[in-house]
Image: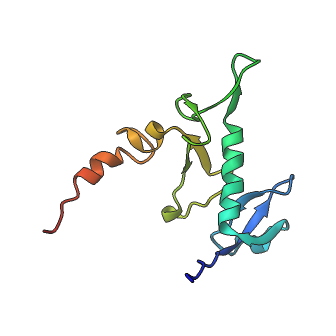
Amino acid sequence: MASKKESKIVHVELGEDGRPIRIFRTKAWLDCPNTILTDRALAVRLIREQVFDRSIVFDPPEEEHNECERCGRTITWDSFEMNEKIPKGKRGEVSLENCEALCHACHTGDADSAHGNRRWQSAKIKSKT
């Protein structure tokens, strides 16, 4: 029987509704009164849900849909991509404040996207054979 991958437990800040709003990367959780330890994957999923919910617009007022937070294209739960404004590699964190709901083009598909055109970048990688 294959072993199950162990979950990573992280410190998270809870919002007023009791859902995670920030996953701490440092010991800053020591100064935050409303924190718990929880599974990282669960915390990311709950923050992702809130980022997606934040992208809901009512236009016209009787019609609800979600829009890319940069360009306004319609996005769905399956098509949206969560972007960290300050990447984790540059000391950013997964949080409601640092994340945004983007369409594929704004996230990785275009030259002026959040990450540049990654398709073009990956095409530059040459094999060592």
State the residue at coordinates (47%, 43%).
107
The coloring applied to the image is: rainbow
Q: Residue furthest top?
A: 60
Q: Foreground: 81 or 11?
A: 81
Q: Residue furthest left?
A: 129
In the figure, 93 relative to 37: above or below? above
In the figure, 53 relative to 38: above or below? above
Q: Quadrant of residue 21?
A: bottom right
State the residue at coordinates (41%, 48%).
115
Classify residue 95 as left or right of residue 126: right
Q: Foreground: 40 or 106?
A: 40
State the residue at coordinates (86%, 53%).
16
Q: Residue furthest front?
A: 1
Classify residue 100 as left or right of residue 58: left
State the residue at coordinates (28%, 46%).
120
Q: Foreground: 73 or 86?
A: 73
In the figure, 13 relative to 83: above or below? below
Q: Where is residue 13 drawn, in percent x and y?
A: 77, 63
Q: Where is residue 63 drawn, in percent x and y?
A: 72, 20
Q: Foreground: 51 or 24?
A: 51
Q: Where is residue 88 drawn, in percent x and y?
A: 53, 62
Quadrant in the picture for the C terminus = bottom left
Q: Where is residue 2 drawn, in percent x and y?
A: 55, 81
Quadrant in the picture for the N terminus = bottom right
